[in-house]
Amino acid sequence: MHGFARRPVQRADMIEVSSTQPTIALDHLVVACSSLDAGCAWCEATLGVAPQPGGRHALMGTHNLLLSLASERYPKAYLELIAIDPDAPAPARPRWFDLDDTSLQAAIAATPQLVHWVARSADVEATVAALRAIDADPGRIVEAERMTPQGMLRWRITIPDDGRRPSGGAMPLWIQWSGEHPSDTLPASGLAIESVEVDGITPELASRLGSLARNVDSSTPLRAVLVGRRGPVTLMSVVRRVSD
């Protein structure tokens, strides 16, 4: 499989890559927090709106809050505020998004931080095969789920075995939803994603991401600009881990 060349698309949020490649889209941004209370307070102070209840991830011992970032350009985009669930048993494997990393834990103890982003694929297995062909392995495909008041959400997502963020968060994780999407029940927030920028990925990967993110020279692996009632707000990821 040889890439994600841009073609005319039928939906604003999806890039149709070829007749043999799945469509891809920006799914959500991930902000890590020391606790969901801290994440909620940060969200209200920084973005001017309260996040919505999410749920618990038994697979990873985490829980989350959600905030819609849906727009005409990214109709299903949302913000995930995620934290280690103090009431959940420790998982048998490293948690996703580097949440077990001591330097990241120290950073989010001070304030929540943008740490990663997740791209959606219509066929995650085909996407992973294409990425591995250019030496951009996003990790294994893992099945996950969480309960909501509307029922169970289920998805498949790529996660490196060590739980670390590929390219420090510049390379997205990849997700394929089964049925309902979290944004289907989120109220409008008045916020939207204006841009996503990454640094530290190869030109080959950048070409496959297409318009999902701009590949730039930066001091941080991931930067996102949100726009809303308060104007633009720039979120920047934690600088690469000192524990690497």
Image (cartoon, rainbow, N blue to C red):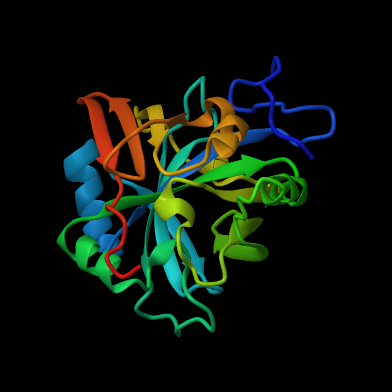
Left or right: where does residue 173 sit relative to residue 199?
Answer: right
Relative to 141, residue 8 above or below: above
| Residue under the point 72% across and 28% down | 17
Left or right: where does residue 87 sit relative to residue 229?
Answer: right
Residue 58 appears in the rendering? yes
| Residue under the point 61% across and 45% down | 181
Q: Nearer the viewer, residue 241 or 20?
A: 241
Residue 152 appears in the rendering? no
Relative to 105, residue 81 above or below: above
Left or right: where does residue 121 sit relative to residue 186?
Answer: right
Relative to 232, residue 218 above or below: below
Q: Position of residue 152 (x, y in %)?
A: 63, 60
> Could you say which quadrant of the image residue 218 lies in?
top left
- Toward the right, the furthest residue is 20
Q: Position of residue 65 (x, y in %)?
A: 39, 54
| Residue under the point 39% across and 40% down | 199
> Could you say which quadrant of the image residue 229 lies in?
top left
Q: Quadrant of the C terminus?
A: bottom left
Q: Position of residue 183 (x, y in %)?
A: 53, 41
Relative to 139, residue 191 above or below: above
> Could you say which quadrant of the image residue 34 lies in?
bottom left
| Residue under the point 40% across and 54% down | 168
- Toward the top, the furthest residue is 8
Q: Nearer the viewer, residue 133 or 191?
A: 133
Q: Nearer the viewer, residue 172 or 80?
A: 172
Q: Quadrant of the N terminus?
A: top right
Q: Position of residue 26 (x, y in %)?
A: 54, 36
